Amino acid sequence: MTGATSPTARSAPPATPGTPGTPAPLIRRLAAALVEEGVRHCQWKGYLRQRRREDGEGDIDLLIEASSVAQLTAILGRLGFIPALPRPPEQLPGVLSYFGYDRATGRVLHVHAHFRLVVGHYWTTTYQVPLERACLAAVVPGPLFPVPAPEHGVLLTVIRLLQRYTVRDALRPDDPAWLVRARGELEALGTLASPAAVEDALRHELPSLDAAWLHRARAALAPDGGPWRRLVARWELQRRLRPYARRPPPALGVIRVIRWVVGLGGRWWRRSSLHRPLSGGKVIALVGGDGAGKTTSVRELAHWLGSCFPTMTAHLGRPPRSLTTLAVGAWLKVVARLGRRRTGGEEAFPGYVALLRLLCTARDRYRLYGKARRWAAAGGVALCERYPVPQNWPLAGPQIGRYVEAAPHPRLARWLRDCEQRYYDRILPPDALIVLLVDPEVAARRKTDEPAEYVRGRARVVWKTDWSRTPARIVDAGRPLLDVLTDLKEIVWSVL
């Protein structure tokens, strides 16, 4: 079982069942491409729960031969994977992350490419287990990807479980759920690996450990092993693997303690470790008339994308109001209550307080735009609804200019108009513009909480605009929501 048979010859993935014309899930296409290109690889953990991986849940941890970095990058790029990085303190040497959108399942697949076998979390001491060459030289066929030989699987599983076990786990009244689940995997591997093969692997490939320690470690991980025996076995493991240790920066531990205290142990605030696309963050705008489904689409996209990348949403049509805006709004209500509002046609002068309120709205939109831009500059994705673009200005743009001619004091009105215009001029185009196009009659039937003619009029603004001269992506929003979301996900993923 420890021979040097080529992994590509021994581990071709099974044919993908399915209806002719139906694309294979992304994970199966990745497995096939790695074999076709002759990349030496194996799935070094989690392969006994393959069904969960095929459904797009959890991560795929692949050990890749270091000389195949260029091949792997080309394959993943061809399949539409996006390289991503965690924040600098969370990065582990020898480990890269890629995210791929699986159009067959609608899920995002997360692939960890390990060029070194690193165990442990980034905030603790991690250990590079020197078994890379041995694992890649003795792979066996797995459910989908080739997997390490059983003797290597036993060693890696024991090391991972002990390294994960902490004092906090020992103080719990019951064993942690992850350990209970992992016992089944360890038992299954133990039935496949002969004791002689395991001892031989220890003696030739990992001499810092021995058979006596492995026996104690497996006994400690058993249900009757006891928490303190596990901690002793963990301490002994760390002592023996000390030459392969990598300690995190001291400041990282301090930062984690502060976050834990401020967040009341994670009860009030918990930060998930998300990755940033290697190409940088993006501001993605969705525009459309009333009834086009912008709010629902933004919400669904944020839920889908937020599982892997930092994602925020921003409604620039209704930005958060500043204190100044609230004060002017209150003033406007007082003026209206006193009966000083002017009457007349649509372009009749509404009063200078109303113009000041429009100026405050422009300022609030610019402030929210700045927040979205800063989010993208930090590597996140900002999904913006009702983004002010010139084609969309009648719905979310400068309005004061309509009332200049009717103003009693045109100079003051022009000054307010110019101030408002400057805010909108500072709002640069988004990185991607998506237009949800829907027929005004369909929009009126959908949005029943507003007068039908009002909805039709706002929908016509977008419906009659010539978007062909803009970089906008047009999506037919008159279709069912699932079809619209499918198109939106493909567009967003292509932008990232």
Image (cartoon, rainbow, N blue to C red):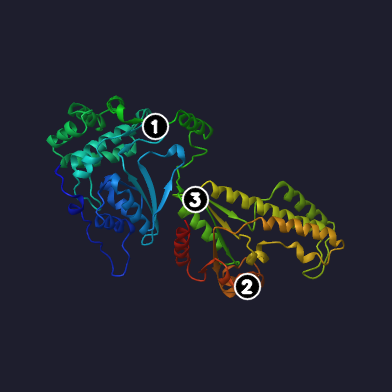
Q: Nearer the viewer, mark 1 or mark 2?
A: 1
Say which residue appears at 57% left-offset and 74% top-offset: 439
Q: Nearer the viewer, mark 3 or mark 2?
A: 3
Q: Which residue is mark 2?
A: 460
Please tell me which residue lies in front, 186 or 41.
41
Please tell me which residue lies in front, 383 or 128.
128
Q: Please say if the residues under marks 1 and 2 sit with CB atoms less than 8 Å apart.
A: no
Query: Is label 3 in a helix, a strand or a loop?
Result: loop
Q: Which residue is mark 3?
A: 280
**What residue type is disc 1 on?**
Thr
Q: On screen, 449 above or below 48?
A: below
Is residue 227 visible in the rendered structure shown here? no
Q: Which residue is mark 1?
A: 124
| Residue 318 image point, x, y percent | 65, 56
Say which residue appears at 71% left-offset and 56% top-offset: 422
Badge 3 or badge 2: first in the primary sequence: 3
**What residue type is disc 2 on?**
Arg
Crowding around mark 2 (Cα neighbors within 10 Å: few <14, some 14 to 19, many 20+) is some
Q: Quadrant of the N terminus?
A: top left
Task: In the rendered structure, find residue 176 and report the number of the disc placed on it.
Answer: none
| Residue 357 image point, x, y percent | 75, 55
